[in-house]
Amino acid sequence: MKRLFLSAALPAIALSLAGTAHAGSDKGPARDKKFFQSVQGEWVGPGEIVAGKYKGTKFTCSFTGTTPDGKVGMSLDGGCRVGVFTQKMSATIEQKGRGYRGTFMDGSEGQGLDIISGNVVDGSKVILAINRKQLNGVMQARVPDENSMHVTVSVRVDKQLVPVIGMKLTRVDDTAVGAIAKN
């Protein structure tokens, strides 16, 4: 039962990562490009379903982020694990006009989600609108420093956005694994 819910919930997690990064004080397209490029690399971390029937379910994710040549956006490949179950995931987001659009897995026409709009808000936050048939929601990612991301996925219930998934990811490709002191 948890596996079925996780298959539905994890697309939102991966989708949330598709727009997560750290940007400088630039504005416009240069800021956005820098924002997405900073997500390149390896990310891992725990997450938890924080509301609903499966509240308290914990999972761990691992993703590799890349950026497309000549375009503003990014792709993520990886997966998330709950106990012995692993769900493979991929997400792609690209600039379309003044916002962003993309898909998680095969989009809402298949088993995934569509990214229907989104904008890099400032140097530490991005917001993306997500959709799958009657499910509408948003993902907000906050980047407190260049090596961590805090992600919240919320769904619309009546006229309110209710947080349902929270994640904390850590960059693992640029972290120091040891140090040698100078004499």
Image (tube, rainbow, N blue to C red):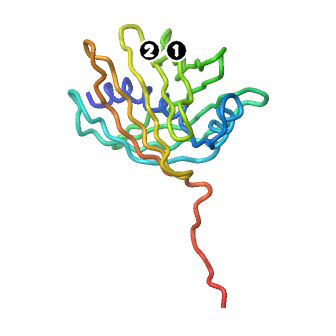
Looking at this view, is 177 or 86 the one in front? 177
Q: Is 124 displayed left or right of 8 in the figure?
A: right
Horizontally, residue 24 falls left or right of residue 136, namely right
**96 or 88, nearer to the observer:** 96
User: Which residue is pictured at 52% across the width and 23% down the height?
Assistant: 104
SS for dot 1: strand
The amino acid type found where label 2 is placed reads Asn
Q: Residue at x 60, y 19 (%)?
A: 99
Q: Which residue is mark 2?
A: 131
Q: What crowding class fits label 2: few (fewer than 14 Cα within 10 Å), some (14-19), or many (20 or more)?
A: many
User: In the picture shown, does residue 175 fall above or below 8?
Assistant: below
Task: Locate residue 176, reporting x and y percent.
Answer: 59, 66
- Decide if residue 127 is on the left or right side of residue 39: left
Q: Amino acid at mark 1?
A: Ile
Residue 90 disc label: none
Instruction: Please give the name of the residue rendered at 31% of the width and 22% of the height, measured from the top-left corner.
Output: 161
Q: Is residue 147 above or below residue 105?
A: below
Question: Tag on residue 116?
Answer: 1
Q: Are marks 1 and 2 in contact (CB under 8 Å)?
A: yes
Measured in 3D between alpha carbons, the distance from the residue under mark 1 to the one under mark 2, in whole angstroms, is 7 Å
Residue 95 sits in which quadrant? top right
Which residue is at the front of the view, 123 or 95? 123
Which of pointers 1 and 2 lies earlier in the amino acid sequence? 1
**Residue 38 pos. (x, y %):** 64, 43
Q: Residues within 10 Å of mark 1 (few under 14, many from 20)?
A: some
